Amino acid sequence: MTRSTGRDAGVVRLGAAGAAVTVATMLTNALAYLVPVLGARRLAAAELGALATALALAAIAAVPGFGLQIAVAAHRARWGATSGSTRLALRTAALTAGVTALAAPVLSAALRLPVALTLLLAATTFATVLAGRWLGELQGDQRFLRLAAAMTVLAAGRYGGLVLGLALGRGPVACLLLATLTGLAALPLLAHLARPDPAAAPAPPSTPAGGAVDRRLTARHVLTACGASLAMLTISYADLILARQLLPGDASGGYAVGSVLTKGALWAPQVVTVLVLPRLAQGDRRARIAALTLILACGGVLVGASAFAGELAFRLAGGAGYLHLAGEAPLFAAVGALYAVVFMLVNDRVATGARWPAAPLWAATAGLAGVALLAAPRTVEGILVCALGTAVLTAVLMVSLAFRRTSGPSPIGTP
């Protein structure tokens, strides 16, 4: 009876944590979508284009922050707190911001952006990347309610200044300046949320058989996680970029509307990956199987729903002008559902210290580009079939790599 009660309490806690992280993710996405909605109503077309381009660059520059979060979370779940994480996080944030600042003149000239706008990107990038350190600590410690709060604070910091600036009728430079200030102001709050709980006794680090291992969190771990994050971002947008390059304007617009379903199916089950990452870092195979089951079930539901209500999905995503693509809705959703599986398994490989965890994704991206450029029909269906085939093959490969490992996972920090 006691064991059953404890198990039930654990399920309730995990469910509450999942709900909190889901709400925080939805709030983040809502604020991100509110910015272009307000911008379209408050800015001239040229100003809106400049702000949208700057935000796209900011999203790319923020990739090291995701990598830092994954690396810190996996290492902390495996080995506990280490003294070098603060210095490593500051170096990662400073390096990313420095590269962004050095690229500012080139970006300004190439994309016809004000220099002040591109220079402000460096400051916002510093805040966003550094935040990954505290998010990773909370995730690795499995303090998911605090993680949800931290995600909300970070979202308010990243987008609150933009929303305020647009509401006040300011231009792109003033809006990004306000976003920089709110982003920097969020950092002390994140540090406060990530403070250790004195009432919680830290779990002893696991020690694998075979002698001592290096338990330090190093730049190599962060670079590996950053490379994986960049690979996931690249492959998730590769088909959309190819559609823009290869299709006529109207068809590429239709593909962009369909890709909304892809992104929905991709990101809907990501809370599972967030919750399971610490267990994956500790080598919990049952957690991996449970996560795969949940993600596949979620994907199946979304694909089925898009098949049943394809017209409604396209009407909501793009309007009545795109209803002719409603029959392709399940395929767009299937691409996202398969990549959700792939992304979870990439995080698994990063967490367990696998060599070149993102190599299959880079190979798949190259293969998709090659087939689309050389053989695919120049239609929405042609590009979509290429994307779906790539997603299927990549998912099968990642699953086979995950379950081919018969020995215990390599600890973080070992080859």
Image (cartoon, helix red, strand yellow):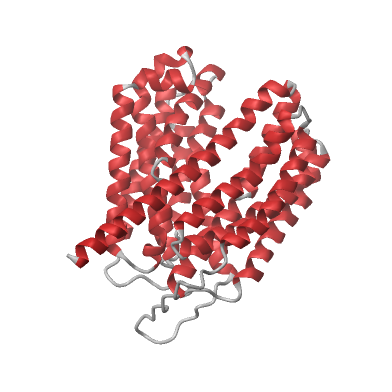
Closer to the camera in the image, 374 or 212: 212
The spot of residue 337 in percent (x, y) is 36, 40
> Outermost residue, left direction?
1
Compared with residue 4, is residue 61 higher up or lower down, i.e. above or below?
Answer: above
Compared with residue 173, is residue 397 higher up or lower down, i.e. above or below?
Answer: below
Q: On the picture, is 299 further left or further right than 118?
A: left
At 29% from the left edge and 23% from the top edge, which residue is drawn?
Answer: 308
The spot of residue 342 in percent (x, y) is 38, 49
Quadrant position of residue 164: top right
Closer to the camera in the image, 399 or 14: 14
The spot of residue 207 in percent (x, y) is 39, 81
Using the rendered image of the protein, determine whether residue 403 is visible from the camera's viewpoint: no
Closer to the camera in the image, 406 or 263: 263
Closer to the camera in the image, 210 or 304: 304
At 78% from the left edge and 33% from the top edge, which residue is drawn?
Answer: 112
Compared with residue 239, is residue 44 higher up or lower down, i.e. above or below?
Answer: above
At 40% from the left edge and 34% from the top edge, which residue is drawn?
Answer: 386
Instruction: Locate the C terminus and report the quarter of the image it occupies.
Output: bottom left
> Outermost residue, bottom direction?
211
Quadrant position of residue 351: bottom left
At 44% from the left edge and 66% from the top edge, which residue is drawn?
Answer: 355
